[in-house]
Amino acid sequence: MNVLLVEDEARVADFVQRGLRAEGWSVSVASTGESALVMIADACFDVIVLDLMLPGISGQDVCRRLRAKKNRTPILMLSALADVEDRVAGLRIGADDYLPKPFDFDELMARIEALARRSDGFGQSAAAPEVLTSGALSFDTRSLEVRCGDTPINLTPKERDLLKLFLSSPRKIFSRERILSTLWAISEDPQTNVVDVYIGRLRKKLGTCGESIETVRGAGYRYAENGPG
């Protein structure tokens, strides 16, 4: 998926860009409305994530100009203004969806995917199973029981959330940014080492099953399914 992110807050833009790229998406970034219009004229995007408050040409004006030119690229508008009137105004000028700041990264991804589905019809993912397994490791998401073979594992809620993330997509690489945004929300400092600390704790508690949590240098972590079976 090819996404254009129009955001003038450098920290937010960098965080979102790295998170989306970690999901395998192509992301271009514009910090002003003027540069966004130039980029849109020169390239095709599947979804435009457009901040409302921009220097120079506002996000609303960018949206108006695109729709006036019959450009129907799906637009997800972002704004710290969360009043109903602001959301309605954005939708009335042609935006397809509206997400107030601060936002959860997973919700941002879900809304981008939903907009892309409307435009090109790709299918939805299946519901997650109630019991997640990989080799000797199992996690019953109903009873919250975790086992490595026959050994019960006592995890904290945050450790269970981290394990669930891994087991929901075995062998998928999760960047630190993605883990941070999913478990600790997007407002957390992306330079924190909290992810590494929890990875270390989870590996230790899972024992031999924890050996399957791999560090992928320069990319993040994954559950590699190569533990004892």
Image: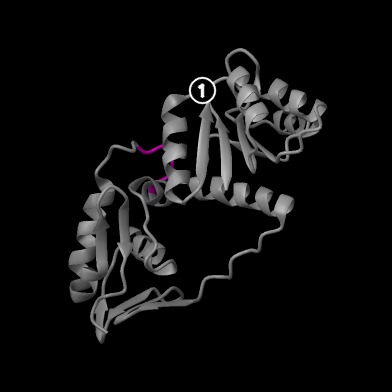
Q: Quadrant of residue 81?
A: top right
Q: Residue at x 34, y 38 (%)?
A: 190
Q: Quadrant of residue 192?
A: top left
Magenta part of the chain = 184-188
Is residue 102 visible to the viewer in this orientation of the structure? no
Q: Position of residue 3 (x, y in %)?
A: 57, 40
* Left or right relative to 174: residue 77: right
Q: Position of residue 93 (x, y in %)?
A: 79, 29
Question: How many marks on residues?
Answer: 1
Question: Is 62 part of what is drawn in magenta?
Answer: no
Amino acid under disc 1? Asp
Main secondary-structure element of the magenta-colored stretch: loop
Q: Quadrant of residue 159?
A: bottom left
Q: Residue at x 59, y 66 (%)?
A: 125
Q: Position of residue 45 (x, y in %)?
A: 63, 39
- Residue marked by disc 1: 8
* Left or right relative to 5: residue 123: right
Question: Is 186 part of what is drawn in magenta?
Answer: yes
Quarter of the picture holding the C terminus: bottom left
**In the depicted view, which residue is nearer to us: 94 or 187?**
94
Q: Residue at x 51, y 30 (%)?
A: 29
Determine the secondary structure under disc 1. Answer: loop
**In the depicted view, which residue is nearer to us: 34 or 191?**
34
